[in-house]
Amino acid sequence: MLTYSFEDCSAESMYEHLYRCIKQDILQKKLRAGEKLPSKRAFAKNLGVSTITVESAYAQLVAEGYLYTLPKRGYYVCELEKDPPPPPRQETAFPSKPPQRDWFADFAGSSVAREMFPFSVWVKLLRDVTAGEDEATLLTDTSAGGIRQLRQAIADHLYQFRGMSIHPEQIVVGAGTEYLYSVLIQLLGRGRGYAVEDPGYLRLSKIYEKNDVRTYHIPMDASGIIPQKLEESGAEILHITPSHHFPTGTVMPVSRRYEFLSWASKGENRYIIEDDYDCEFRLAGRPIPTLQSIDVMEKVIYINTFSKSLAPAFRISYLVLPRHLVTRFYETLGFYSGTVSCLEQMTLARFLSKGYFEKHINRMRNHYRGLRDKLLQEIRRSPLANRLKISEENAGLHFLMEVDTHRSDEEIIAAAEALDLRLTFISQYYFSDENRRPHVLVMNYSGLEEGRIPEAVARLCRAVLGE
């Protein structure tokens, strides 16, 4: 009869130890397929354990397919289809994301100064939410569109700040714009051609391509995407950033906007996705009116995010769908659960409705204006002053700086990295090589430390001039 020792099983229960011993004998073919195991009572007596121990071990082996039972006849070893794979000779090395470099100055990344976020206000609102009268809402499965309180708060904010008159039911809240892009692809269809700006946001192109949709990179002029090129492409969905194009900073004039609305009206399946990603940070004049606010044909899908205005870690974004697409959304995609927790949604709803968001934006705008002015001041009195042209400094959180230099963009980037600076050029955002513009830096200043600006500009001059 089978015999196993229980002297070294202090780390696990007796039935687990017995289960592992029998399993090992089966895998090593010490117990052959079809072989009958001892009865529970006889086995328990032989091992000096309880019948329950043997019964539990047998039950686990049956559940995993190592044993089978025959009524009133006992337990038998199963025939395994194939031998188990041999253990790997060495541990697999999984790829890992390289750690983020802590640059002396990062003119390429987008970040939010930690000291600018109103942590005390957010914590207070979070505490109010958890201690309030909405405990039931916190524990329920959320709608695919998001909780009503947040959608109402967003609708009110868009009316006051962007002049958009919309119903809360038109809003869909999601965990980041990248998730919402995939939602739109499912809603509008993978069989459509999607047009994006060239140059443009490269991650957007990758998201469309990874979702197996035809992507057209349409060249731009000083007013935005060229309408003739869009028409020639055959695309049905147009994704644009009319109020502040990235990376050129271009603000699309109203005449071009009406051209695109006319284009969209000529096809039942034509839509415009208006990406309004940093509309809050126009530093001169009033915010540019949205394309959605002048759309009478319901052809514009508006998308925005709180990642730029609060912090990237929040991952809270939203869509505003035309009314006729709301029904289609809930009929075809309404089975999805909300991707943002109710706790975060309700806290953000209060942050918006109680006026804290507006105060935060005003504070951030003043902070960014100060950073921009300090940076421009240092640049204009640097050795680069007579060799550059600055544009689009009022449109958002970056501006363009065209420099007169004998060095290539790649040489300047490499020299800057050696000086612990991170730079990007507009040439890096083109899909097509044909229209690339060299020597135009995209100067993102949102993550700069004011005290480091003079030294950062000095290093930038050395990288650009090769001195």
Image (cartoon, rainbow, N blue to C red):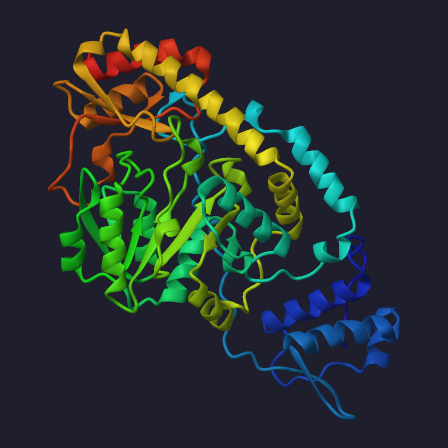
Residue 193 in view (yes/no): no
Left or right of 239 on screen, residue 63: right
Q: Position of residue 85 (x, y in %)?
A: 49, 66
Q: Position of residue 203 (x, y in %)?
A: 34, 46
Vertical order, 428 against 338 (above or below): above
Vertical order, 131 against 325 (above or below): above
Which of 101/284 is in front?
284
**Callout count:** 0
Vertical order, 120 against 271 (above or below): above
Q: Quadrant of residue 51?
A: bottom right
Q: Quadrant of residue 440?
A: top left
Which of 61/444 is in front?
444
Which of 444/19 is in front?
444
Q: Position of residue 28 (x, y in %)?
A: 59, 69
Q: Quadrant of residue 287?
A: top left
Q: In percent of the image, x 78 and y 47: which residue is there?
A: 132
Q: In percent of the image, x 65 and y 74: which residue is there?
A: 64
Q: In percent of the image, x 38 and y 45: which residue is there?
A: 290
Instruction: Give the residue furthest to the bottom.
Output: 72
Left or right of 332 on screen, residue 459: left
User: In which quadrant is the N terminus drawn?
Assistant: bottom right
Vertical order, 454 against 155 (above or below): above
User: In which quadrant is the C terminus drawn?
Assistant: top left
Q: In percent of the image, x 75 and y 53: which residue is there?
A: 134
Residue 466 in view (yes/no): yes
Which of 170/5 is in front?
170
Q: Position of residue 140 (x, y in %)?
A: 69, 60
